[in-house]
Image (cartoon, rainbow, N blue to C red):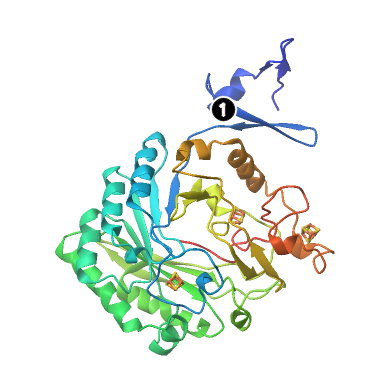
């Protein structure tokens, strides 16, 4: 451990080898924080790497599993002016690599989604789109290929028409035709992009079809299948939950060959954790990601990006209040990212400095946890976050 010395004027001299090792340079700014006896220096770095952008909260479907069954938030499209401001502000973010158009609506319902993608691609940023695939007709596919979108993740919560329709109320044949159309568009335009990912929300009523999903993924040329557990918003979903507090067997894994030009890669199946565990880490914070909602509001993750309620791991209903760290109409993304509150929140999450509500003796009677608040003083609390447990996963 290196030793630091405080001078008479209160300045602290950090050892040279420490500065070199941590790549700390002159003029860097820090927020000063403390926890118990520890002094914490939080660097104000422009190191945001991934931006999740919610183009809309409008959707063309009405899935049984959707948050929209319980929330009262507005259903609206992002203004183009908001998107233009966002793209302009990304010029200050030298480490930004990817924009993910997804969120709690269907991105392809936005009337200007192609213009949005074009503006982001002009900044030479990689683009992922998450979609239910129903509006992905041949013309849309050709445009997305031509714009250089490099990943498309389509939600498929079943393999048979009955199961898919039971969750989504739509016809799987239309989505599969659209994906085949996308593959044709890629062939015609001589592109390997976008690579295809499939997102599968595991339920008691569809889990038997997971084994067949890898065969379908192989036929469709998907490089990745991401399996997530359901975040149960309605009481009807209680019976569909497969995970729990007590240990239970994981889903079985598999892989399949995917043709990529002259190469053959192996497709991967990413499985969620099935029970509450000791290890917690937040992918949003670790990936240095931020969520910009349809109205320009900034949240640290999807879990805290809207007002809604859901059932926590032990079945208690929890009211989540949106955690807005700013709005890009009033402050730049960089100002919000490097603000004292956001730097401190990320540090709390990185250290996972939250109690574990499901393991607490007061869990049955404590109403703090019903409101997304914590007893250790930091609100909102990530204390029983299912994302931090990898029980619920996002693309
Ligand atoms: S497609 Fe997505 S946003 Fe639309 S209703 Fe289904 S789960 Fe909700
Ligand atoms: S908020 Fe604190 S007291 Fe309440 S259940 Fe969670 S850990 Fe226990
Ligand atoms: S731990 Fe959960 S609630 Fe906290 S920031 Fe991460 S995803 Fe959001």
Is residue 122 left or right of 157 when viewed as pictured?
Answer: left
For the C terminus, give its image quadrant. Answer: bottom left
- Front one among 58 and 271: 58
Is residue 83 left or right of 315 when viewed as pictured?
Answer: left
Q: Any atom of ligand 3 within 8 Å of the CB at mark 1? A: no
| Residue 352 higher or lower than 17, as above or below | below
- Front one among 252 and 144: 144
| Residue 276 higher or lower than 90, as above or below | below
* Classed neighbour count for the residue bearing mark 1: other residues with Cα under 10 Å, few (<14), some (14–19), many (≥20): few
Is residue 83 left or right of 245 when viewed as pictured?
Answer: left
Q: Residue furthest left?
A: 188
Q: Secondary structure at mark 1?
A: helix
Quarter of the rendering containing residue 77:
bottom left
| Residue 347 higher or lower than 277, as above or below | above
For the N terminus, give its image quadrant. Answer: top right
User: Which quarter of the rendered image does ligand 2 occupy?
Assistant: bottom right
Query: What is the x, y in percent for residue 72?
Result: 54, 67
Q: Residue furthest top?
A: 8
Query: What is the x, y in percent for residue 97?
Result: 39, 45
Q: Which residue is mark 1?
A: 21
Query: What is the x, y in percent for residue 181?
Result: 22, 72
Residue at the location (39% across, 39% down)? Answer: 89
Is residue 145 left or right of 133 when viewed as pictured?
Answer: left
Q: Residue furthest right?
A: 361
Residue at the location (69% across, 24% down)? Answer: 2
Residue at the location (31% across, 70% down)? Answer: 221
Query: What is the x, y in percent for residue 103?
Result: 45, 61
What is the count of numbered marks?
Answer: 1
Residue at the location (62% across, 58% down)? Answer: 321
């Amino acid at each position: 451990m290196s030793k630091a010395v405080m001078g008479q004027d209160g300045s602290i001299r950090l050892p040279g080898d420490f500065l070199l090792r941590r790549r700390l340079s002159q003029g860097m700014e820090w927020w000063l924080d403390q926890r118990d006896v520890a002094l914490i220096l939080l660097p104000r770095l422009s190191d945001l790497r991934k931006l999740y952008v919610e183009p809309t909260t409008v959707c063309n479907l009405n899935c049984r599993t959707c948050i929209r069954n319980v929330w009262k938030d507005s259903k609206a499209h992002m203004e183009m002016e908001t998107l233009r401001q966002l793209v302009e502000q990304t010029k200050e973010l030298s480490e930004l690599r990817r924009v993910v158009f997804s969120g709690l609506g269907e991105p392809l319902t936005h009337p200007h989604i192609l213009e949005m993608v074009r503006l982001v691609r002009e900044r030479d940023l990689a683009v992922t789109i998450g979609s239910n695939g129903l509006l992905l007709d041949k013309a849309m596919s050709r445009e997305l290929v031509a714009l250089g979108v490099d990943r498309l993740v389509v939600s498929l919560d079943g393999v048979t028409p009955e199961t898919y329709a039971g969750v989504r109320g739509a016809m799987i044949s239309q989505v599969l035709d659209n994906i085949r159309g996308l593959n044709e568009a890629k062939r015609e335009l001589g592109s390997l992009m976008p690579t295809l990912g499939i997102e599968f929300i595991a339920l008691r009523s569809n889990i038997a079809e997971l084994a067949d999903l890898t065969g379908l993924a192989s036929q469709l040329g998907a490089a990745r299948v991401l399996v997530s557990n359901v975040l149960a918003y309605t009481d009807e979903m209680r019976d569909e939950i497969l995970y729990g507090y007590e240990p239970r067997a994981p889903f079985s894994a598999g892989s399949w060959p995917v043709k990529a030009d002259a190469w053959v890669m192996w497709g991967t199946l990413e499985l969620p954790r099935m029970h509450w565990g000791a290890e917690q880490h937040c992918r949003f914070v670790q990936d240095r990601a931020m969520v910009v909602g349809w109205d320009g509001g900034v949240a640290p993750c999807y879990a805290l990006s809207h007002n809604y309620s859901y059932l926590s791991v032990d079945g208690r209903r929890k009211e989540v209040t949106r955690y807005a760290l700013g709005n890009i109409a009033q402050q730049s993304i960089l100002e919000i990212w490097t603000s004292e509150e956001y730097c401190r929140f990320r540090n709390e999450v990185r250290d996972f400095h939250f109690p574990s509500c499901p393991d607490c003796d007061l869990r049955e009677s404590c109403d703090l946890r019903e409101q997304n608040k914590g007893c250790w003083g930091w609100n909102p609390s990530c204390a029983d976050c299912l994302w931090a447990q990898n029980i619920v996963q996002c693309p």
